[in-house]
Image (spheres, rainbow, N blue to C red):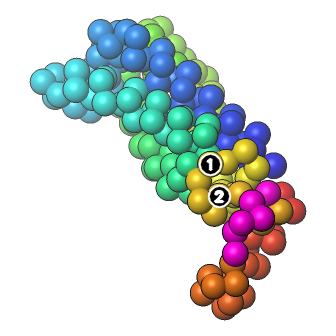
Amino acid sequence: MSVPVRIGLAAVWLIAGGIKAVDPDQSEIAVKAYHLFPDSTAYAVSLVLPMAEIALGLLLLIGLAVRPAAIASAVLLVLLIAAIVSVWARGYTIDCGCFGGGGEADVSWRNYLTEILRDVGFLALAAWLIVFPRSHLALGPGSRPRAARDDHDDDSNDPATAAGVDDEMATEEKH
């Protein structure tokens, strides 16, 4: 189950970051619409955010540092949800710019609610990967279930295995 979750969340980050990266001017407009950063830093945020999204997407796609990437994804999603809630609570009407576009727009409360629920769904994917980071088709050391590891792996000298910490991995293999 972790492979489709990992690929799905990777796709979200790669699409969102890719769209923003190709149009940094529009991304700056979207960042400014939130009224959370001084205008002097909005452009920097509009450049850094897509790069962070793309980096997270690539890590998840190749299965490298899955748990840290999932934790960073969860933190970023909580911040993005908080930003949308903040805009809604302060009465601004904007397109969130999450997948391009952004800025002032004629939107209703339904738009904000839909965006928040969508991001909560993405947050659930990140939470899954925090709990179950191991999956097939992953490149990171220790990121694949035991059955998928090479025969060359010798866990007999691993203190965690000797201490019986493998219970978590056995649980993850079922998912």
Residue 63 in percent (x, y) is at 62, 46
Q: For mark 2, what is the residue? A: 143
Residue 167 in view, yes or no: yes
The boundaries of the magenta stretch are 148-154
Q: Is residue 8 left or right of residue 42?
A: right
Above or below for 163 versus 15: below
- Mark 2 and mark 1 in contact (Cβ < 8 Å)? yes
Q: What residue type is labelled 2?
A: Ser
Q: In the current view of this chain or complex, which residue is farthest to the left? A: 40
Q: Residue at x 37, y 9 (%)?
A: 23
Query: Dot 1 surroundings within 10 Å: few (below 14), some, or many (20 or more)?
Result: some
The image quadrant where one finds the C terminus is: bottom right
Residue 42 disc label: none
Q: Main secondary structure of the magenta part?
A: loop
Above or below for 81 versus 139: above
Q: For mark 1, what is the residue? A: 139
Q: Residue at x 31, y 30 (%)?
A: 48
Report helix, strand or loop for mark 2. Answer: loop
